[in-house]
Amino acid sequence: MSQDFHMRTVARVRSDFSSKFGVPRQSGLVDALEAAVVFEPEYRNAAALRGLEGFSHVWLVWVFDQAVREGGGKSWSPTVRPPRLGGNARLGVFATRSPFRPNPIALSAVALTGIEETADLGPVLHIRGADLMDGTPILDVKPYIPYADCVPEALGGFAAEPPDREALTVEFPPELLERVPPDRREALRGVLALDPRPRYQEDPRRVYGFCFAGLEVKFSVEGTVLRVRDVEAG
């Protein structure tokens, strides 16, 4: 018998990404990326986090709330074109991590660096390595349990190895780097080195831009070198 379940947003992420462009394609790829998990008012109860301080990592169960689907979110396709395969092959949606799924739910493992009790927001989780936009709704937080969640002999299918695009060399003019807050520079360099461009775009003349930490970062890529062209207030 078919059943529908109502899910509640228990928290939202606060990160340096105000749009999807530039967000790492998987969690943990840029460890220097810092973010916070802020609980919704009704869940700001420190008792709900009792014992979590003993874990180094957590799972975030979240929603692809910015994924635009045809049919107002009611339609779905059994196959998708993974960017990892160049968009030329179709695979089953349940064999991919595509945001365009019957239920737009995602799962990310992130490092838990601290739990802060604040006067206005209650308990806040500080995390690293997140692949989430600012404002992303969180459905649940679960502890990462190494003996159960880590499977060294697991097979990775078509994504068994890291992307074949090698890390880019980032050329960041000193006068532009100075416009970036010191505590965000390492994270930004990590994001740029991963090549934020869409998988299918290789035009060395094109200047791309994305928002990070309240700044608009513009860059171009030629070969394996990414050159930062400008950094402006977003």
Image (tube, helix red, strand yellow):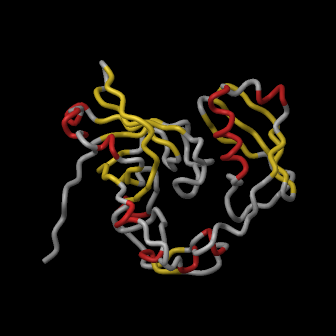
* Residue drawn 44% across the image and 55% down it: 109
Point out residue 138 in the picture as x, y percentages from the top left corner: 34, 47
Point out residue 18 in the picture as x, y percentages from the top left corner: 54, 38
Point out residue 220 in the picture as x, y percentages from the top left corner: 81, 47
Point out residue 89 in the picture as x, y percentages from the top left corner: 60, 81
* Residue drawn 71% across the image and 47% down it: 192
User: Can you say which quadrant of the picture contains the C terminus?
Assistant: top right
Q: Give left or right: position of 167 versus 163.
A: right
User: Can you say which quadrant of the picture contains the N terminus?
Assistant: bottom left
Is 223 rendered above or below residue 117?
below
Q: Nearer the viewer, residue 65 or 132?
A: 132
Residue 62: tell me if it is visible: no
Q: Give left or right: position of 226 versus 193.
A: right
Quadrant of the rendered image containing residue 54: top left
* Residue drawn 36% across the image and 28% down it: 116
* Residue drawn 36% across the image and 56% down it: 144
